[in-house]
Amino acid sequence: MVRGCLKAGLAVFLLILVGTIPAVDSKIGQHSGGREAMWYRKLDNHVVQCELCPRRCVIPSGKRGFCRVRENRNGVLYSLVYGRPCSINREPIEKAPFFHFLPGRERLTLATVGCNQRCRYCQNWEISQAKPEDVPAETMSPEEVVALAERLKLPVICFTYTEPVVFYEYMYDIARQARSRGIRTAVVSGGYVNPQPLESLCRVVDAIKIDLKGFTPEFYERVCGSTLAPVLSACRTVAQSGVHLELVNLVVPGFNDDSTTIRRMCEWIRDSLGDTIPVHFTRFHPDYKLLNSPATPVATLERAVRMARRTGLKYVYVGNVPGHPDENTYCPDCGKKLIGRQGFTVTENNIANGRCRFCGCRISGVWR
């Protein structure tokens, strides 16, 4: 969880890790810079239409889109957060969570402010629901981000915490730079993005985790302020691209925890994406605008896991319950424990060359 990404905290982190603090732009609120956006079209009278996400915001000159970080300046759409991370950290890849992508490795995490959804339970709402001028940030070019990962010997740069779609241009350029230097990139996203930008992104990144927040249009409208269909489309796009995909479903009591909906979601994943997609059923903790909702009972998560396995999904996990047996990876053929986990720590790994060390079954994922 990210909390209060203060300028001092970010600067101290960089000082400790790399021995230097990038210059801080004291005029962050003025946004004299920025980079032209990649996905938009020009309309009449200096109006533009953003084509990055399903909202397709029509933005008059001097105004911003729904995400608060893309601004029309005299008929040209700009990203206000390009090169302006508000959070940088190093964490286990398991925290994403990615369980079938380089287990036991650390990642360099990065985020800017902004989001194109309005989830009522957001744990990082201080930055996801903020405007760029409201949150201190550092100035770091894509080259500097990749150089930091190299210096720290981190094999993965992960775009996370807020919604990476809204800092698409920054993410895209970092990913291209990283690939040229042998560093992988991973995206933690809500999947609320249009097909063409997502297809382009899939050509430069290595892994994407999508939060499939619910499985009814009503849930997305009520809890996320968005729509379900584009997220399902994004899941299919990633699965078909060959980029490693994992899914997370945060199970919120009274909102998306009924057995019928969970079973339908699992059947859709099996039929549309494949039975080897890792699926994480994650425990909800009260936050933001759902402070009065109870935490998810562990029994509810266990019920979801059982249903998913009966549906035929091979890799299903319980999340946010450290020490639970279902945070381990088991071979779908022989049933032996392959990867043992205690929270975000990998305690054992019995996968060799992508196969079960005990029976030789091929295990879906990116292991080295």
Image (cartoon, grey):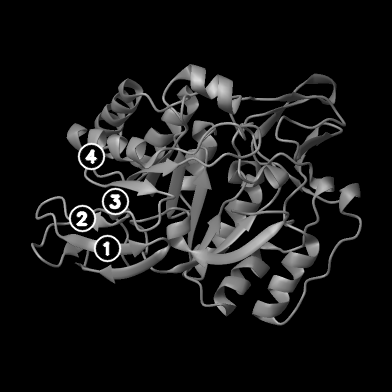
Q: Residue 341's spot in the image, x, y percent?
A: 33, 63
Q: Position of residue 4 (x, y in %)?
A: 73, 54
Of callouts 1 and 3, the N-terminal one: 3
Q: Amino acid at mark 2?
A: Tyr
Q: Is residue 227 visible?
A: no
**Mark earlier in primary sequence (2, 1):** 2
Closer to the eye: label 3 or 2? 3
Residue 142: where, in percent of width, then height?
65, 62
- In the structure shown, which secondary structural element does the residue marked by tag 1 occupy? strand
Alpha-carbon span between mark 3 and mark 4: 14 Å
Q: Secondary structure at mark 4?
A: loop
The residue drawn where x is 25% and y is 35% is 308
How far apart in space, not on screen, are marks 4 and 1 (Cα)? 17 Å
Q: Residue at x 71, y 82 (%)?
A: 19
Going by the numbered disc 3, the residue's amino acid type is: Asp
Depth order, front residue of 41/135? 135
Image position of 225 with respect to 173: above or below: above
Which residue is the site of mark 4?
313
